[in-house]
Image: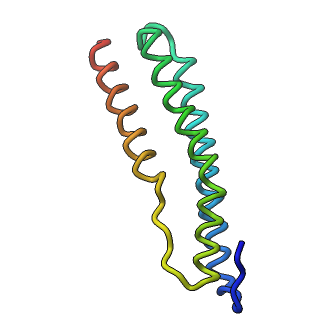
């Protein structure tokens, strides 16, 4: 990592660290959701759809965890260089991915009644 002449305000560094930990917490929640989806009764969803939803959630979890540290590093570098902060590239994928899983789950719940 390139270190500039001045250290960033510690509050910004600590906020960046909290954001990193939040990405990891989100990853754990997605993973737990995927495991829970895999454990749902066959009465609720057809088995292949349960598997698709579970794998989607666990894949989003892995992606979120894998991108957390590189994101932290890019933000920290920008803070040290007084550069613009990079956009969170994974945020749209996570948002749309979780929304897609939720919509599919709602449809399957409604069709199962």
What is the quadrant of residue 6 in the picture? bottom right
Screen quadrant of the C terminus: top left
State whether residue 24 is above or below residue 101: below
Screen quadrant of the N terminus: bottom right
State whether residue 26 is above or below residue 70: above
Q: Residue at x 55, y 29 (%)?
A: 34
Residue 49 at what x, y percent from top left?
Answer: 42, 15
Q: Please tell me which residue lies in front, 29 or 59.
A: 59
Residue 57 at what x, y percent from top left?
Answer: 51, 32
Residue 91 at what x, y percent from top left?
Answer: 45, 53
State whether residue 64 is above or below residue 5: above
Q: Residue furthest bottom?
A: 5
In the figure, is residue 72 to the left or right of 3?
left
Residue 24 at what x, y percent from top left?
Answer: 64, 50
Q: Please tell me which residue lies in front, 62 or 5.
A: 5
Q: Which residue is drawn at 27% across and 15% down?
A: 111
Q: Which residue is drawn at 60% across and 44% down?
A: 27
In the figure, is residue 13 to the left or right of 99?
right
Q: Which residue is drawn at 32% across and 27% down?
A: 106
Colour basis: rainbow
Q: How many labels does the image show?
A: 0
State whether residue 21 is above or below residue 9: above
């Amino acid at each position: 990592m390139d270190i500039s002449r001045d250290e960033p305000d510690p509050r910004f560094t600590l906020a960046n660290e909290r954001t990193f930990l939040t990405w990891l917490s989100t990853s754990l929640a997605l993973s737990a959701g995927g495991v829970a989806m895999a454990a749902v009764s066959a009465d609720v969803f057809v088995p292949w759809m349960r598997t698709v939803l579970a794998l989607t959630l666990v894949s989003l979890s892995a992606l979120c965890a894998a991108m957390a540290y590189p994101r932290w590093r890019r933000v920290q570098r920008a803070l040290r260089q007084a550069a613009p902060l990079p956009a969170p590239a994974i945020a749209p994928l996570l948002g749309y991915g979780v929304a897609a899983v939720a919509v599919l789950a709602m449809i399957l719940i409604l069709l199962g009644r």
